[in-house]
Image (cartoon, grey):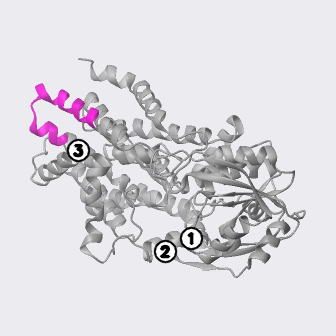
């Protein structure tokens, strides 16, 4: 058996190898699926382009013009840290989905290493390793962690914050507390919802120190540090993140009401799918053992309070939000995995413990590989390539389809065609309140007016997903315009996917009409930040 000391030395190498193998299943070559993913990737490209252009005289004008050219930008809707960290990588390695995934992968490695380091406070090295695999390779974690999403980058900062907090509790100095606050702040600058962990810190310290907690100078310094550090984020959220605020306060298409029992049980029902049934059942057993004091020899009362408040605060926080998605609650899976392994330690003898941990970790990996592959939809990079090879200089391309973000990012990834702009058909024909489920208004444009407007905008090519939103009359008019003699089908691009996606192909049309120079005013609704713009193209 390899010693704990040897495991500790080998751990970064083993985790790097594991993460690299995990990313073999990540979608590449511009084959985004989830609508937010290419937007997160594009936001980092915008930061890179902003620093290259350095428009000190009018940065907001630069941002609006950038959105008019690449209308998938959501830079102010989300916290900015991941995009700031992505920008240098785009500058070094070029704009591509692979570059964005590299940044996510580095965060994934730090996340896995942080989980192992956190679990090592309570588990021997090998058990901490298998517990790390159970979490890092869990179906829900691996599904979102191998896409350009914010969950794993935020989780990485959050976990290392917890590591520093435990070090502070164990008497390793006040600097650990300050680092804990800084790292949690960085997690919130990546994804705001990680902030619930601060409440777990406060409850743990209060339970351990009681009134003495308020008399210690370092706690007040930490509080001031957090308040000052998060003030810019709070202002950004209040000004530009109204859709996020709405997701907390109430949305029209909530899966279940937060005022119902179903709403408060919703995330509990997701746990078996997130971790797998074996880990979920063992976590429940660990929770019961912890509640009945059966784990006293494994954890102190302060330790139990820390993990319980992490789980409880997170569960209440996410359950109180109307917008429910299973990925939101991955931040409370770490306590459940630790409880699962502690339950194994309590229920099995040392003779069987290592084998059981190994079997459980392998089962999680197999469930992720076989049952939760990362989804992809291709064809968008090929469509962008076609446009890049055929479109006249300084022209625009009109896109109509569900995955507009994927097409826009792939167009920006063509560094040889910075002269091309993208116009979205839904922006031209509709007014959508963030997403269609929250409301849509159709604009009154006749077929003749629409055809003329396409010419005015300098659009030589149209890329369209057939029958996209054609239950709306405005989109049916658009399809009739494309079927007119003004447009000619010049290519059909298949959109291969590993699931039953919305689209099967993208059709590229050439505009045979009298196309103008494109120097005209473009009106853009930005409901995601509550603004409407008129931009001269």
Q: Quadrant of the N terminus?
A: top left
Q: Quadrant of residue 139?
A: top left
Residue 205 left/right relative to 50: left
Q: Which sits in the foreground, 173 or 435? A: 435
Could you give the CA–CA distance between mark 1 and mark 3, rounded to whole angstroms? 37 Å
Could you give the CA–CA distance between mark 2 and mark 1, rounded to whole angstroms? 11 Å
Q: Nearer the viewer, mark 1 or mark 3?
A: 1
The disc placed on residue 434 is 1
Q: Quadrant of residue 519?
A: bottom right
Could you give the CA–CA distance between mark 2 and mark 3, rounded to whole angstroms? 34 Å
Which residue carries the number 2 mark?
A: 246
Q: Which sits in the foreground, 426 or 347? A: 426
Residue 182 left/right relative to 137: right
Q: What segment is highlighted magenta in the picture?
A: 342-363
Q: Nearer the viewer, mark 2 or mark 1?
A: 1
Give coordinates of residue 371: x percent, y percent.
34, 43
Give me the residue at 16% from left, 30% from top: 353
Above or below 182: residue 91? above
Labelled pair 2, 1 in contact (Cβ < 8 Å)? yes
* Mark found first going from the N terminus, 2 or 1: 2
Q: Quadrant of the C terminus?
A: bottom right
Per the image, label 3 sits on a secondary structure element best described as: helix
Give coordinates of residue 452: x percent, y percent.
82, 72
Which residue carries the number 3 mark?
A: 279
Q: Which sits in the foreground, 479 or 12? A: 479
* Mark found first going from the N terminus, 2 or 3: 2
């Amino acid at each position: 058996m390899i010693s704990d000391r040897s495991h500790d030395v080998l751990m970064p190498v083993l985790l790097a190898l594991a993460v690299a193998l995990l990313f073999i299943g990540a979608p590449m070559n511009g084959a985004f699926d989830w609508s937010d993913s290419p937007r997160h990737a594009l936001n980092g490209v915008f930061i890179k382009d902003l620093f290259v252009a350095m428009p000190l005289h009018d940065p907001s004008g630069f941002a609006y013009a950038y959105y008019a050219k690449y209308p998938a930008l959501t830079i102010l809707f989300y916290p900015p840290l991941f995009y700031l960290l992505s920008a240098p990588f785009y500058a070094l390695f070029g704009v591509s989905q692979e570059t964005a995934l590299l940044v996510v992968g580095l965060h994934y490695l730090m996340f896995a290493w942080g989980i192992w380091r956190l679990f090592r406070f309570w588990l021997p090295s090998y058990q901490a390793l298998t517990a790390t695999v159970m979490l890092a390779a869990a179906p829900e974690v691996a599904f979102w962690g191998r896409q350009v999403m914010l969950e794993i980058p935020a989780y990485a900062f959050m976990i290392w914050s917890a590591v520093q907090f435990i070090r502070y509790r164990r008497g390793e100095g006040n600097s650990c507390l300050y680092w804990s606050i800084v790292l949690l702040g960085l997690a919130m600058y990546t994804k705001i919802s990680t902030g619930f962990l601060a409440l777990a810190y406060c409850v743990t310290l209060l339970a351990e120190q009681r009134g003495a907690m308020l008399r210690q100078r370092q706690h007040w310094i930490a509080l001031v540090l957090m308040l000052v550090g998060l003030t810019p984020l709070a202002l950004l959220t209040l000004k530009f993140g109204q859709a996020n605020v709405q997701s907390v306060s109430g949305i029209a298409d909530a899966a279940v009401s937060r005022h119902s029992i179903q709403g408060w049980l919703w995330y509990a029902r997701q746990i078996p799918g997130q971790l797998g049934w074996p880990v979920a059942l063992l976590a429940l057993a660990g929770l019961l053992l912890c509640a009945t004091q059966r784990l006293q020899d494994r954890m102190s009362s302060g330790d139990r309070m820390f993990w319980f408040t992490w789980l409880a605060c997170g569960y209440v926080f996410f359950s109180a939000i109307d917008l429910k998605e299973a990925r939101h609650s991955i931040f409370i899976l770490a306590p459940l995995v630790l409880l699962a392994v502690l339950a194994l330690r309590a229920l099995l003898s040392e003779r069987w413990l290592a084998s059981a941990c190994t079997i459980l970790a392998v089962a999680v990996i197999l469930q992720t590989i076989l049952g939760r592959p990362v989804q992809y939809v291709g064809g968008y990079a090929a469509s962008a390539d076609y446009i890049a090879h055929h479109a006249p200089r300084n022209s625009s391309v009109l896109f109509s389809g569900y995955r507009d973000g994927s097409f826009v990012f792939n167009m920006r990834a063509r560094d040889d065609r910075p002269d091309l702009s993208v116009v979205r058909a839904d922006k031209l024909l509709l007014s959508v309140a963030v997403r269609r489920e929250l409301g849509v208004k159709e604009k009154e444009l006749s077929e003749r007016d629409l055809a003329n407007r396409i010419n005015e905008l300098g659009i030589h090519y149209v890329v369209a997903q057939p029958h996209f939103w054609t239950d709306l009359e405005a989109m049916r008019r658009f399809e009739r315009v494309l079927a007119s003699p003004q447009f000619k089908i010049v290519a059909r691009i298949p959109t291969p996917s590993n699931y039953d996606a919305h689209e099967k192909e993208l059709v590229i049309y050439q505009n045979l009409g009298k196309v103008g120079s494109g120097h005209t005013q473009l009106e853009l609704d930005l409901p995601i930040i509550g603004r409407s713009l008129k931009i001269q193209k």
